[in-house]
Image (cartoon, rainbow, N blue to C red):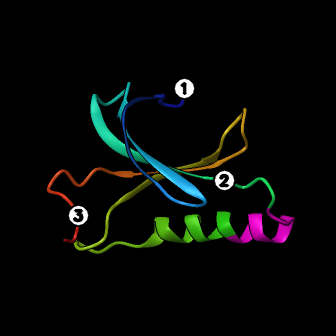
């Protein structure tokens, strides 16, 4: 069974995406979910956006946030990217 994520709080929002701090039910651990709006994108753009997220999964470096999973939402069809939560803040 896939883990489910409960939204804890909104972290930010941009033109095409928004990010939330979420808690994973299976691990009792915090993650970040970035939801990318895919409505209005051509099929090729959607494919490229999804492939970019999958490529992110292959990155492994101590200075890069760790990727957990990617999936398309059932209701709104947003691209959902789950990553580890860096609780030390941002680059600034």
* In this rendering, position of residue 53 left or right of residue 20: right
Residue 88 in the image, given as x and y percentages of width and height = 14, 56
Question: Which residue lies at the image location 47% right of the left edge and 70% below the top edge?
Answer: 58
Q: CA distance from mark 1 to mark 3?
A: 32 Å
- In this rendering, the answer to whether 51 lies above or below 16 is below
Q: Which mark is residue 1?
A: 1
Q: Earlier in the sequence, mark 1 or mark 3?
A: 1
Q: Residue at x 41, y 73 (%)?
A: 59
Seen from the viewer's position, the closer of residues 15 and 53 is: 15
Q: Is residue 77 magenta?
A: no
Q: Residue at x 29, y 38 (%)?
A: 30
Q: Is residue 43 magenta?
A: yes
Q: Position of residue 41 (x, y in %)?
A: 79, 63
Please give the label number shown on residue 36: none
Of callouts 3 and 2, which one flags the residue occurring earlier in the amino acid sequence? 2
Q: Which residue is mark 2?
A: 37
**Could you say which disc has been placed on residue 90 in the image?**
3
User: Which is more toward the observer, 46 or 70?
Assistant: 46
Judged by depth in the image, the label closer to the viewer, 1 or 3, is 3
Q: Is residue 84 left or right of residue 44?
A: left
Question: How many marks overall?
Answer: 3
């Amino acid at each position: 069974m896939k883990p489910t994520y409960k939204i804890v709080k909104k972290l930010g929002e941009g033109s095409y995406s928004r990010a939330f701090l979420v808690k994973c039910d299976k691990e009792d651990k915090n993650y970040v979910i970035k939801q990318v709006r895919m409505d209005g994108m051509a099929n090729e753009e959607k494919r490229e956006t999804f492939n970019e997220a999958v490529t992110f999964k292959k990155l492994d470096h101590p200075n890069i946030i760790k990727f957990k999973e990617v999936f398309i939402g059932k209701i709104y069809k947003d691209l959902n990217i789950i990553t580890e939560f860096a609780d030390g803040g941002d680059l600034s």
